[in-house]
Amino acid sequence: MKKVVLAYSGGLDTSCIIPWLKERGFETIAFVADVGQGDDFSAVKKKALKSGAEKVYCLNLQEEFIKEYVFPALKAGALYQGKYVLACALSRPLIAKHQVLIAKKEKAQGLVHGCTGKGNDQVRFETTFRLMAPEMEIIAPVRIWEFKTREEEIEYAKAKNIPVKVTKKSPYSIDTNVYGKAIECGILEDPWAEPPEEVFTLSKNPLTAPNKPEYVEIEFAKGIPTKINGISYKPVTLITKLNEIGGKHGVGRVDMIENRLVGIKSREVYENPAGTILHAALSELEALVLDRETMQYKARASHKYAELTYNGLWETPLKKQLDAQFDQIHLRTSGTVRVKLFKGNCLVVGRKSKLSRYKKAMATYSAGDKFDQSKAEGFNALWAMPFKE
């Protein structure tokens, strides 16, 4: 029998994959990555074994996820299409990396994932596989098996006595981690249909959110968030805390038409309270402490970083080079930002830093103005000169 390692979540697809592989003579080791999805991992392990897995690994990767994946992407200002904080995309290369390490430890011959042929995750997993273990076979059952619909998968799971949370009445595909949540399928496949309130669990409906705004101060050290309202938190706890605070005010909901790597468009719904707050806050701190040329360059580099992450190119030379650049850029981004959370909105209303480039004496129109306006006439003449006939 060929031994393979499966990235196992316990969801509909991977629940069907284990018995499907067993029917074809594979010995399956299930790997469960705890990235903060909040599952009962004891139950998930039992389910994997009951489904036919020979062994189950469960690793808590939350701290590594936040420190080595989320924070670098935050420093890069990586927002895919200017909206998506890449919460789920960032977890894929991390999961794939540990899946490969387990496969090598177990002397497995293959790596298995439950991604579809029309999604982005297949690329994120397989690129990491091919870079880290090019000698191993890659198996993607969802691309080749006989099931044509999720409804058929549900029937197969029932026939194998495998309990699944997905039903024909609630067919959503949901991916959650400590940083955020992604929801698709069902009625969401209609771009005209408003997402039903039932799909949201991390954020309160803005209409019923508190009628009083909440002010939150976030302190950064070289681009990394370290404190909330003056209290220090470890990375995972900080993200969890901001998700709670932002979610209470309905912050972080995103409904977008996304350009997938494979060439199709998809309708995606996300919940990212912490990510929304942190990106807004850090961006304003950058505006305070960075020079104009650096900011303009960073905007272009941020766009590229988001594309590399979304497209599964996390373990590539360019992405690592950009990390080094962003580390250099953020040598100055230490300070505090105050945000106002209210009815789904996150507004930056204050920012301060010992490294601020803002000089009131140069900007003020009141007493104490030290800007030499006599130099403006020459500046304006030179500025317009290249465009004169």
Image: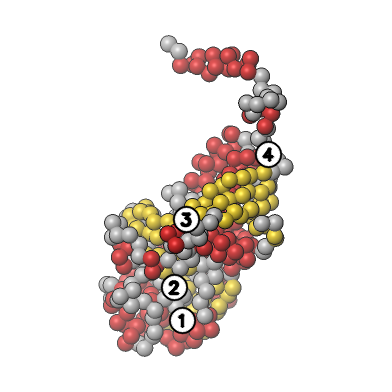
Instruction: Identify the element where label 3 is drawn.
Output: loop
Label 1 close to label 2 by CB (< 8 Å): yes
Disc on the earlier residue, 3 or 1: 1
Residue 166 point in image, percent of width and height: 36, 76
Q: Nearer the viewer, mark 3 or mark 4?
A: 3
Count neighbours of disc 4 (C-alpha within 10 A) and say few if under 14, some if 14 to 19, many if 20 or more. Answer: some
Label 3 close to label 1 by CB (< 8 Å): no
Q: Looking at the image, which residue is at 42% across and 76% down?
A: 11
Which disc is residue 28 wearing? 1
Q: What type is the residue that disc 2 sits on?
A: Val
Task: Give the quadrant of residue 115.
Answer: bottom left
Report, in whole angstroms, how far the alpha carbon at label 1 lies from the one at label 4: 56 Å
Report, in whole angstroms, how far the alpha carbon at label 3 lies from the one at label 4: 29 Å
Q: What type is the residue that disc 3 sits on?
A: Gly
Disc on the earlier residue, 2 or 4: 2
Q: Which residue is mark 2?
A: 112
Q: Is residue 50 above or below residue 323?
A: below
Q: Nearer the viewer, mark 2 or mark 4?
A: 4
Residue 251 point in image, percent of width and height: 49, 57
Residue 194 point in image, percent of width and height: 33, 59
